[in-house]
Image (tube, rainbow, N blue to C red):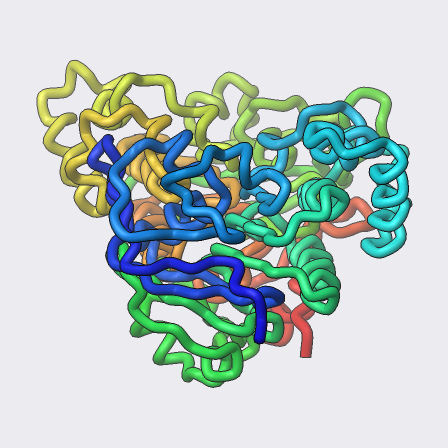
Amino acid sequence: MQNEKVICNKFSFAYDSNTFGIHDIDLTIQEGEFIVLTGKSGCGKTTLTRCINGLIPDFFEGTITGSCRVCGMDISEHETGDYSSYVGSVFQDPRSQFFTLHVKTEIPFPSENLGTPSPVIQDRFRNTVKQLNISNLLKKSIFELSSGEKQKVAIASIYTANVQIYVLDEPSANLDWEGTKQLKKLLGQLKEQGCTIIISEHKLYYLKDLADRVVILKDGQINTILSGNEFKAQSTNWFHDNGLRQVNLKDIVCNPASVKAATREQVSVRAENLSFGYQSKQLLWKDVSFECQSGDIVGIVGKNGTGKSSLIRVLMGLEKPKSGKISIAGKYASKQQRRHKSFYVMQDVDYQFFAGSVISEMVTGFEKNPTAYERAREILRKFSLEGYENVHPSTLSGGQKQRLSIALSCMSDAPFLYFDEPTSGLDAENMKLVSETITEQAAAGKIAFVITHDYEFAASLFTSLLVVQDDHSIKRISPDEYRSETLSKIFELEE
């Protein structure tokens, strides 16, 4: 009989801050199981992972009823430190859990913190490097790592600590398709070695062959539990009806958008022979030329580190190109002129929130407009953020912050919109909402540039693509070339 690692019996948790919690959870997770927690944003999956890894109730206070036992310990009777030898966590942004500056010191750090004898740490460290095939990372600093490599180091550190349970919270959110493949391979290795893995995710396609069971939560309760085989056998319509991301990306039909922009105040932007690189380093891309008109929604895709974010920073005037020029409406536009006409939704949205409440954030710059508050509240309702007007933006969940950043773009009058990974951490319904919002803005005569690694998002939103390639060139995919086969090849979808 398998060893039971997690036992929840009529378990409920309500946050003291009145934030939504979970209730009546009955779930038993056996040793060696690979469990996927999914559901619409706000369904309670992150709260459940916090209960398993010990963050609740120590770091997030609230009221517990029923019982939740992890490795034999009731969470209401133990502190977070009691779980550190048994449960290892990998957060959506691994940077938040790093403590040292170099890979070779970060991997053994959790073991050192637990007081593990040095000879044991050294043996485990060597075994980790061999088993996870990460010797190529040992000479790197933490700051040199790609998003996928950071995930590898975070997993390697808890692997070295010899934990019994791995808890991962949306680990693919900031990864490109190559990084997601590497994550899938690494999780497969852990599964083969009998590790217990609990992963909270919206993106499901890379987990379809790994999951033993999929737990679907809704409104804080377990709605459905399916075996891995039952889950991946569901139809495309079933995933759509349940507000979930698709598991079979090949079934998604690629339909490039066709947006008829408003005829008034037409705008255009033209890039001519742009090249860019940081200081003395090799150029990230060179000889880039393209032109966009009102109503265009331009997708920018490519692997991590190829210069996608740098491209939009140059276009909006935050960076100066090494060569080339940018024109607006046929006239050369300076950096200052481009910044004045641009609105930017950053990948890490925490960096763009400045106000003390959600409503204040929405009306910043529009305080003297008598209709600004009414308009802001209407937009917040659209993004399911009503009731959060007086909440500080930093206290919102990851998905709520992402939606707030998109809501802010709706308040802007700027003709050029730039979005860097706008669907990171969003469920299927909110991904669709973001798509519809950007389409509406383009129809109003704006031009949108959107960076994404999200195949589901890219398949139906863009009017054209800019593909940043490994050879430092940028290839434009026109609407005539925008087909499923083309997109599948760009995103390197597995057969």
Total of numbered circles in the picture? 0
Apparent side of residue 156 relative to residue 293 in the rendered image (left or right): right
Residue drawn at point x = 56 percent, y = 20 percent: 335
Q: Nearer the viewer, residue 478 or 256?
A: 256
Residue drawn at point x = 15 percent, y = 35 percent: 377
State which quarter of the image contains the N terminus.
bottom right
Residue drawn at point x = 51 percent, y = 48 percent: 169
Q: Nearer the viewer, residue 340 or 438?
A: 438
- Please identify the residue farthest to the top as the structure is shown: 368
Residue 274 location, quadrant = top right
Q: Nearer the viewer, residue 201 or 104?
A: 104
The answer to whether residue 490 is seen in the rendering is no
Residue 84 in picture, x, y percent from top left: 59, 38
- In the image, residue 62 above or below residue 136: above
Apparent side of residue 61 relative to residue 207 in the rendered image (left or right): left
Residue drawn at point x = 36 percent, y = 80 percent: 237
Residue 492 in picture, x, y percent from top left: 69, 66
Residue 35 in picture, x, y percent from top left: 51, 65
Residue 154 in picture, x, y percent from top left: 68, 41
Residue 250 location, quadrant = bottom right
- In the image, residue 280 above or below residue 52: above
Apparent side of residue 360 relative to residue 428 in the rendered image (left or right): left
Apparent side of residue 16 relative to residue 300 in the rendered image (left or right): left
State which quarter of the image contains the C terminus.
bottom right
The answer to whether residue 477 is seen in the rendering is yes
